[in-house]
Image: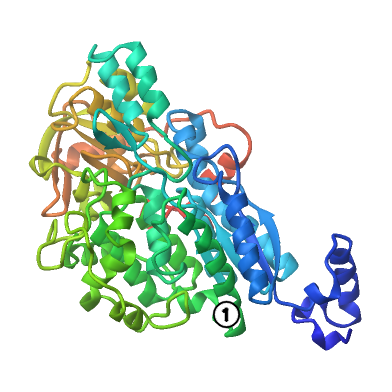
Amino acid sequence: MKDCTYHNPLLQGDTGALKRALYKSMGFDDQSLAKPLIAIVNSYTNATPGHVTFNQLEEQVRRGIEEAGGTAMTFGVIAPCDGIAEGHEGMRYILPARDLIASSIECMVRAHRFDGMVLLGSCDKIVPGMLMAAARLDIPALLLNGGPMQPACYKGKHYDGNIITEAIGWKQRGEITQEEFRRIENLAEPGPGSCAMMGTANTMGCMAEAMGMMLPGFATIPAVSAKRMAAGQATGRAILALARQKIMARKLITQKSLENAIIVLMSIGGSTNAIMHLQAIHREAGLGDLSLETFDVFSRRVPQVASVYPASPHDMVDFDEAGGVPAVMKELEGLLHLDCLTAEGGQLGDLLQATGTSPRREVIRDRQNPFSHTGGVAVLKGNLAPLGAVVKPAAVPPALWRFSGKAQVFDSEQEACHAILEGQVAPGTAIILRYEGPKGGPGMPEMYRPMKCLEGMNLSDTCAILTDGRFSGSNRGLFVGHISPEAYEGGALALVKDGDPIMVDIEKRRVHLDVPDDLLEQRLAHWERPCKDIPAGYLRTYQKISKSAAEGAVVE
């Protein structure tokens, strides 16, 4: 076989002989090595429900690649589960894992110089980490998620798995028995897939589709559907088309396509975590810093046309039946950049011309009759958060859009949960949860559990939580996260004391600590940074190299 028949430059000529020999040791022959080499980046693990189906899905992707004339080669990356990591020190590793995933993909792809890649990822930090890698590497790339799980059904009502945390409060108040609690545990997660609500996992799948890094309509197909397996084959075929047309990732991930993703984020009331992930992807695409102000500009002019749990009773299966991302983008047609490329290689405008309106208007409304005339995610500022903080109006009860309360300060998630469950938090309290940011956590863990404890103790309709940590996309109630500068850096959050008046005004985008400036200066003069016992290893490194939450908590 002549050298020129090898598609991949790494395999050509005499210098390619050793590489060819190494591949041949694993059973590849000259015919297979002559084709484009496409990596399948498989985050399979049987330790994470959103990823447990990926070996089956990988086979479908491989079939599509081979049908289209390519050769598939697989490698793996880690995929930690937020739900399993929540509530203990493991949560501090979840956000830092995002950047590890991006870098591990970079190392493998640059070492082997693949001609393209399909990224199989589903959960909260895996999808953004993979998209960051695609933007950084700028080779033909597509992402395919594993799809949402079916919802749990309890007493005629649909829930996602977070029913368990609420049930802890029910049991604490004596509303259910231990036997009933165990029954809830056994039905809460009915099968594989990402959690059945518009949390970070499903939000980021929607973001990938909205920016053109996933084939249209694929983000919301349920994990157990036959359509999900067919999506694998279609993605395998599509990556070869992009590779042959030399459509690199940065032709899909552009300033305009990221703005389209932000518009969709606002319109679906997606997870607040998507803000920092889109900031990180923007940076990896060579587009510089993406300011929090950009998100607020879009929040003020984009209506929320879709409502999915935790903002409503409708789950991700309902959202898929309602038409998913294409149906949402159809409603927003006049706001979007229609000249952006799709994963199929065509233009978004052409795709939307062929897209019908949603058949389920209770889930996806038309733009003239939205759930809210402003976006489902918003950015607040004030003396408590000069660089910004993030809130999810779509999940906040209208009565809490303007909130005033006295501060009750906690320096850790565990302290806060204990106080809430022991009845030590009064209605109307502004719970301050600090030293949980990128550096102070370190790792910026989710404050998922305190918010759920409030729900379980019937306090979520009157109390607020304000933190420099993050929240889960499943949280609902008044939660203000990503407060920057964080307490560890001497931000105002570090200076709050019990009893201080706190004000949150979502409509005016304000978060304010009602304490005189001169008193705050006195407190700052006496403030000392707390010292945490951090295990030796990556977490210490992350603390040193991570940036502010206002900048996406990226590493330098």
Left or right? Give the position of 364 relative to 554. left
Rendering coords of residue 313 (x, y %): 22, 43
State the residue at coordinates (39%, 28%): 187
Left or right position of 201 against 360: right
Which quarter of the figure is the C terminus placed in? bottom right
Q: How many marks?
A: 1
Residue toward you, 522 or 369: 369
Check disc 1 and report its element: helix, strand or loop: helix
Q: Is residue 294 visible?
A: no
Q: In which quarter of the image is residue 20?
A: bottom right
- Give the vertical position of 212 relative to 447 (above or below): below
- Graded by Cα atoms within 10 Å as few (under 14), some (14 to 19) or many (20 or more), the crowding at tag 1 reads some
Q: Mark 1 points at which residue?
A: 241
Of 554 and 116, the residue lying toward us = 116
Q: Is residue 333 left or right of residue 209?
A: left
Question: Residue 443 location in percent, x, y?
Answer: 47, 42
Its colouring scheme is rainbow
Residue at figure coordinates x 31%, y 36% from the top left: 494
Q: Where is residue 395 in the image (x, y as percent from the top left)?
A: 21, 45
Specify the amino acid type for callout 1.
Ala
Q: Quadrant of the N terminus?
A: bottom right
- Name above or below for residue 113 compared with residue 508: below
Q: Can residue 371 be seen in this view?
A: yes
Q: Which residue is drawn at 32% across and 41% down?
A: 474
